[in-house]
Structure formats: C-alpha cells, structure tokens
Amino acid sequence: MKLPRLLLPLFGLLAAVATATPAYDFYICANINRNYVIGSKIVTTNGIFQRTDEGGWRHFGYNDTSITAVAFDPRDRNVIYTTALNGLWRSLDGGATWRICNSWDMTEGREVAVDPNAPDHVYVAFTDGIAVSTDRAQTLVRREHGLPERGKFTQTIKVDRTRAGRVLAGCEVGIFLTEDGAESWRRVHATTDTVNDLQQSPHDPNIWVAATQSAGALISRDGGLTWTPLAGVPTERALYNVTFDVTNPDRLAIGSWAHGVLTTEDGGKTWTSRNAGLPENPRVWRVGVDPAGRLYASVFQETLFHSDDFGRTWHPNDLAGSLVNYFFTLPKAAN
Amino acid sequence: MKASPFFRSAPALLLAVTLAAQPSFEGPAPVVTTVPAEDQRLAAYHARVDEVLQWRAGRVDLNNIPGTMDMASISILLTLGRDIEACNERVLQMMAEPGTGPFWMFPAVCVAFTGRDLLSPEARASIREAWRTTRQLRGDTENHWVMYYASLYLMSELYPNEPAETWYTGRSSEENLAEAREWLIHWMDTTTTVGQGEFNTTHYIGEYAIPMLFMATWAKDPAMKQRGRMMLDWMFAELATVSLNGVLRGPNARSDEGSVIERWNALASYFSWLLFGNTPPPAGYGGWGLYFAPVAKNYVLPEVIHRIAVERDGDYVQRDRARTRRYWRYSDELSPPVYKTNYLRHDYAVGSTQGIVNDVIQAHVWDVTWREEDPRGKHPTMFSLHPHSSGRMMQAQFATYPEPMPVGVTFEGKPSYDSPDKVLGGSPYEMVFQDLDTVIALYDIAPGERFEHINGFFSKDLRDVTEDASGWIFARGGNAFLAYRPLAPYHWIPYLHYNGGWAKVRDDLGGRVLTSPHLKNGTIVQAASADEFESFEAFQAAMRALPLEFTLEPVPSVRFTTLRGKNVAFTYGETPVVDGVPVDYSKWKLFEGPYLNAEVGGRKLTVTHGRLQRVLDFNTLTIKDSVRE
C-alpha cells in the first residue's frame, strides 16, 4: 500500500487529540512468541502492529521477534526504520521490503530516531555505541567522539524536536548530549548503570524525563543539560521506561518489572502504584500512552492491558503472551 | 544408561529419534589404538561416517515423511542418492514454513548443496524463495554468527548475481557475500590471534565444525575453502589435545547441565568418535552431528592430530589463551583474555581457566576428570563452584534488563541457572589457580548475593569417600586418587541430574553436593594416579603430611605445598605465587605445550606429535606438513 507523504509535524497535530476520530496512528513493536529461541520456527506474528480504527492491531512488515523500536520519516510514511537483533532495517515501501543497513560490526540495535528537522538523519543506539546516517540509512557510520571507550552501551536515543542535530542518548554510564548531529558528544549526567529511557515532554520541549536502572527517574527542565531526581520514584530497582500523557501535562507513567506501573498526576510531585487490576506482581515491560490519553501496560508474557482512567482500572487489550518493546505515535496518515 | 540427543538452541529443528540400531553407541567402547596407515585410518573413518548415514536414513519412514524427515535426513538421503521424490516433497513442505536464524540456516544450506543437482527445480526454488521471504536472525553469540555468516556466504555463492530484492537482507548476492566474507575472516583473525571465545565447548563445537566443513567443501573461493579446512584442523587439534580418552573435560567455555557431569555425553564425543575413534558416540550421533556426516568424507584428519588423540607418551601441560564472550557492560574490555591450564595424564586430567568469567551462564571453570574405559553413564568428575545467578552478569554479556534473564534462560536450555544446587556456570566471586594436578579455588562472595554458598560435586562413581579428621575428603575415581579440602564448614545434599540442557526433570542417579554456606570460602583439590602409591591409605598419609595454611579473613588465602612439591601461595584478588615467583599471565602464549604452540597475534598454529608436524599459517593460508628425521 502506497501511503501519501506526511507533511505536518507530529506534535502540532497532537494538540488536537482526544477527538472522536483519532487524528493519529498508533504503533507498537511486539514480540508475541513466548517460547521462541534462536532458530526455531516462529509460530506467532511479531514485529510492528498498527492499531486499527476498530481498536484491534494490524501487523505489517516482517515477522521478526526481535524488533526493539520503530521510526518513520516524517516526510514519507513509507520510509520506516526498525532496530532489531541484526541491527537497523529500513523499508522504503511501507514495510513490503526491507534492507539491513548496518555492517557486521554493529549489532543488536536498541532504538532508532529520525531527526524531524533533518529527516535524512537517522540515529541508532547499539550495544556498543551510536551510529548515524545522513542519507536515510543508505550508509551508517559510527559517531562516538566524546563517548567513553567503555560504558557506551546505548539503550535509548532521542532527537530534540526543537533543533536539528540535537540528540540525547542514554548509555551505561549516563546521559550524553550532542548538539551537532553526533559530531561530538558530552556527558550531561553520570550514572552507575544504564539509562533505559529518555522522553521529551510533548507539552514543553525543555522538559525531559529519564528512566534509569539504579538512579530512579530523572527530570531535566533545561532541555537535557542538567538533571535532578524525581522524588518519590523508587531507585532500588530498574525502571524500564517512562511516558508522558499528551493530553495532560501533569501526567506521566513509568513501567518497571519490579514496581509495575507508577503514575503521577501532579507533574511528578507524587507517585502512585497502579497495579490493581493487573496480574499479581505485574512484571511491566513497557507503558505507553496514546494521544487520546489511554494508558497501556505490557505485562511480561501476559497480555497488553489498557486503562482509560490512567491506571485506576485495567482491561485486557489483546496480544496474549506479548511483550511490547515500543509504543509510537504519528499523526494520522491521509487515506 | 540414560541417553539424550542434544537439542539445545532449537529443539524443534530436529526430529525425535529413537536409539535403536546405533552400533557404536550401543556396542562396546572402542579400543583406542594408533592407526599408522593412512588408508586404514581413512577406511575406519569412512565406516563411521557410513554408520551415521545409514542409521539416520534408516529412520526415515516414507509413510510418515513429516514425522521422520528433517533437514539432516534429507541431506543424508540426498548424499546417498535415495528417495529423491520424498526429499522433494519434504523440502517443499519445510520451505513453506522456514525457521529463523542460524540453526535453521545451516541445515538449509546442507540441503541446498547436497540437493543442488538432485532436487527438483521446484524444491530448489522453494529453498531459494525462503531466503527471500523469511528474515534470518543473526543471533547474539559467536557460534550463531559463525553459522549465520557461513550460511549466508555459501548461499550467496550458490546464487550469485541476484538482486537485492531476492534476499531477506535486501542486499544483492555480492553484498551479502562481501559482508559474510569480511566477518568470517575477522572471526578467524580473532581466533588465531587472541583465541576463541567459545573454546572447548562440549556441544557448540558442532556449531563451529559444521559450518567450517561446509566452507571447506562448498566454498567456490579457494581461499575461503582453505580457511574452512584450516579452521577444522585448528579446532580438532585442540579437541584432540584437551580430551581424555576421547572425552572432552573441563574447562569449557560452555557446557550444559548433563555433560558437565556425564562428561562423555556431549556432541564433542561425536567428533572424537567420528574423527579419532576413541570413544563411543552419543545417542542419535549428537543430533547436530548428523549435519557433519553428509559431507564428512570431504575432510581428512591429519595423522598428527590423530596421534595426539590416541597416542600419548606421557603427562603433559598445555597452557593456552582464549577470550571471554563479549562484555557489553561492566568491564574495561570487550573480550578480556582467559588463561587455560590443562594437565593430562593417563588416568585423569585436571583443567581450569583463570581470569574473568568467560560465559555467564554455561561456563565450566575447572575440574578433575578421571578416565573411564567406558564413559557412558559415568560421572567421572570433581569440582566446586559458586552458584552465581544475577541480572547484572546477564546485563554484562547480553542486551537485557536485570530481571528477565535469570529466570528466562531456565526455559531456554539452561534449566539450572537460577538453582541454588546448580553445578554449572561461572561466578565473578571465584578465583582459580592450578599447578599440574593441584587446583585451588577461592571464593569471596558479596553479601546479599542470591546464593551465599558454594557447591562441590561428588560423583556417584567415586569410591571410598572418606571425610578425614584432617579436614581432607579422600576418594577414588577410576584409577585416580583424589583429595578434596573444603576450607569452610559444609553439609551434604543429594545431587539431582539434568540429562542435558533441555531436560524437564531431574533424576536421582546418586552422587552428592557438598554445600558450604559461607561467603569466604575455598576448595583445594589434589589428584594423583593410584599407580604412584602403594595404597589408598598411603596417598592419604601423603596428603595429610603436606604443609597447608589457610585463612578466610579478610579474604581467602592459601599456602600449600602440593603433592608435586610446589609451594603455592594464592590469595583471593592477588596474583598466585609458585615457589616464590608470581605467575606472569602476560607471557601466556596462545598455545603452549608439547602438542600445540602458537604466539599471541601470530595467526599460526604448530601442531606437533613426535616427529610429525603440521603448521597452519593463516598469514599465508598455507598448511605445511613436515617429518623430523
């Protein structure tokens, strides 16, 4: 299916959310193969799913159990990038065909991000560092000047939507920032364990939040230059990811294997466990919020749950046995 | 006797096979002899290969093709030129639902090449189509990549000049070939300069040997063909050198719950049997071993390696270097060095690794293994370990979060990983030193670790186990005398056996585990041949007389005069000292011993036995045989 070009930036559209007809497309990367091991036949459908208008999930692209993240070219929805076990994959035809973009010395892609202000530029987090493309992933090269020789396991990478070439990366030893398209990096916050997720507020681009393995959640109010702990978020166990609610600037949610779902509705001043209604001791792999404000929680090898009251009550959604690695929202493509 | 095929990473790929009519598995253990005449060696080798081929072909039921034909049997039938129509039918069925990843890729390569002149155009096209439609995962482990890239290389050569859209990679045949070639050469360079990451593996040896045999047989590029051949020699020379009567013992970069105890019951024994004829093959010829058989006759084992395996004049020490699995996190180096010591005698062997944990889940760091003329069903080994289980170590070597893997891997062929009584796996709290047949293992376990004790394995096959008032525990294993000295109080628990990595239940076959619930801990083991003493009591008396001092605080520390008269001082966290001289690991060669020698960085292995010598030189891609006058 050939999709038309997308001309409007994501966050401009998200101001008009929660209308009767969703003005967005919502994607997940999910692994539904509970017993898969390398080499065995895949007996379920895995990879990228798009939510349908009826609330179901439509799979497209390869049946790949290892996809960790997805990104789109904001100019052309047919240009899709995914990180996966083999590295970075790119499709130019809406997911019908794919090409592996990296050389053998890059492996186990963790996350991919496209610069909305320079859409040919693609940033990829790998187990041993960061690679960048300036030609829509036709070529991919390492750009690690300023990263440490060791400690550059990179779990997450996000582009600042306000300025081309400004990128934050979550690594083993801290949060790193580049302001020149990864020509150089500098550490803006040190950690002793991996920074698992970084998110820029859809409401205020100067606000960023990080979920870390052993330093709890961190917040930056100056575009990622300085970071302080978010009080009330536990630090003794790993936080897997964090998400904003685009419908409400005071709402955030955190997903954690140990803590389940944590939410705040006062901008991070207080946090509440929202596990009632989820399986006992929920091992939450990811949380996500769609632009209508529906909160999702992927519980490890259980199913995907959703909540329309920000975690007070939960409902099984679909995708039994799933593991959602990624939630991603785009302005809705025109038919 | 319990037996199991070795279905490790992808059990669904292999069909269940029965144990009937496997002559060498069921028959008496082979008598180990040197076969000096090349034609006789080759004839015996071919007879063993034919045994495998005939057995597997005989398991095929044409009335039950889906249930009895996997890709190994298809390849074997094609090799034998039999039942081609059934092969066509089954290939079409299997290619309609391809697997994903290296454990599917190399069997598919085996079918593609053995059937390239025999399968129907439709069947061949279905194989080719599967390489377009189904994304193949490269995996995250050295053996995965060897299988993946050897397979991609060969398929790209088989189908040259084909455009990007005809491959799952989205790259052309030439692009695939270039990437695969580059990585394979990189891997060989690494292995021949700083060592293999998955060294002396009880099972994964097949995942290296089979792709290398395919390269040696089917690569069009003569250089890659030669590289494959040379890597086979390299790996089999090492197997010959470190195995005891055909049985690969510790240390092992990776083993599994079954073979770490029943040491013979491993895929490595299939290769020893097939190549050296010095031990029985495991049941089902090791499962994956079936993929070696169809093309096994394209490899000829050099006489010098044959002799290392079956003809040893005396005791020897082999000191080698290897490297760890990749550390993505929590290490100053990506793949730090590992230092191996192997001391082999007629009646037993002692082996260990020194250095950082080389594989977080399946490493087997040290043991004493004694010789059993028929090793089937025997547990001829003794060792201790800290049963380490942690998310942090998982995160060090895998792209994962701290919590999922310690439990997750127990469903993925590593069932004991998170068990307190496990007997497999490395620990960051264990330090080992070995001098000849003495091993000192020290433990300084951090408080709060998941398991705050150590386990020592005491086999059902030990005899005369005696807990002596001196603190030593004496025992006999085969024709070896063994002395085990726990450095902290202990108690006994039953040993429950997993019959392999995919075992679902544990069997009480006998044996015990010495469990010592103390953070500061240690084990000393001394082995000797029964032939060295007038009696078991004399051995015990000799051991009691050896000077031994140790302390556990502030860290475990031992001063011990070994049975061989060496004064060893070893303190946890410090360099061991022998006869007043600190061990200098910086001078450790890639291989150093009477049989294998190589310099770090050299890309050249010299294999020696008596007057025979073979030099594998990866700098020039030459094999040079010589005979000393």
Image (spheres, coloured by chain):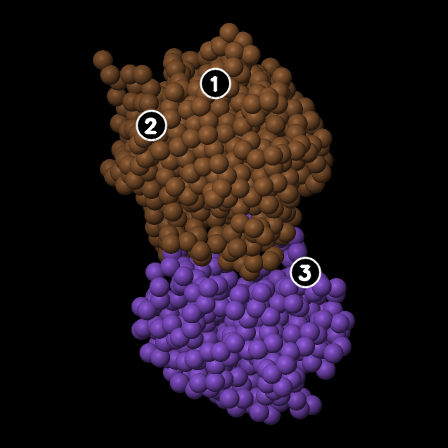
Chain colours: A purple, B brown
Q: Quadrant of the N terminus of chain A?
A: bottom right
C-beta proximity under 8 Å, tags 3 and 1: no
Residue A190 visible in the current orientation: yes
Q: Which residue is mark 3?
A: A301
- What mark, if any, has residue B579 been given in the picture? 2
Q: Secondary structure at mark 3?
A: loop
Provide the secondary structure element on which disc 2 rests: loop
Circle on res. B545: 1
Q: Residue furthest left?
A: B629
**What's the CA distance linking mark 3 and mark 1?**
59 Å
Residue B344 versus residue B197 in the image, above or below: above
**Subunit of label 3:** A
Residue situated in front as seen by the camera: A127 or A81: A127
Of label 2 and label 1, which has the lower sequence position? 1
Left or right: B467 in relation to B320: right
Q: Identify the image quadrant of the C terminus of chain A.
A: bottom right
Q: Residue at x 52, y 69 (%)?
A: A215
Rendering coords of residue A210 (x, y %): 51, 74
